[in-house]
Amino acid sequence: MDVEKVLKKALKGKVYFGSKRTIKALKRGEAKLVIVSANCPKDIREKIEKYKKNVPVLVYPGTNMELGAACGKPFSVASLAVIDADIELLTV
């Protein structure tokens, strides 16, 4: 799965940025897809794995700063949760 293509499509819908909001979305069952940076801290990855259930988790090949820039944000993004996702997005 091409993470950059998925990210581009995902950003057109509702997305929660940041580890706290990502984990909260997983706990609530809102997240359809999670993307984490390659250098996402181990403790955050463990929490995401714990709560992900059947939610796919993709690893962005760059750092959190690069993921933030790819999302058009002026800050680093270690993880994000895609809330509005269609079938096409999940099968890219």
Image: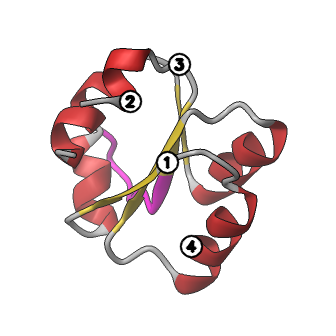
Residue highlighted by disc 2:
90
Q: In which quarter of the image is residue 10?
A: top left
> Mark 2 or 3 closer to N-term?
3
> Mark 2 or 1 closer to N-term?
1
> Mark 3 or 4 closer to N-term?
4
Camera-nearest residue between 39 and 48: 48
Magenta segment: 73-79
Residue highlighted by disc 4:
45
Q: Distance between the residues labelled 2 and 3?
A: 11 Å
Drawn side of residue 89 relative to residue 34, left or right: left
Q: Residue at x 63, y 48 (%)?
A: 22
Q: Which residue is drawn at 64% across and 63% down?
A: 48
Q: In which quarter of the image is residue 70?
A: top left
Find residue 67 and report its horizontal and vertical position in percent: 28, 54
Q: How far apart are marks 3 and 4 (CA)?
A: 22 Å
Where disc 3 sits, the SS reads loop
Nearest to the eye among marks 3 and 1: give it: 1
Answer few, some or many: residues within 10 Å of disc 1's Cα (few below 14, many 20 plus, some between 14 and 19): few
Residue highlighted by disc 3:
84
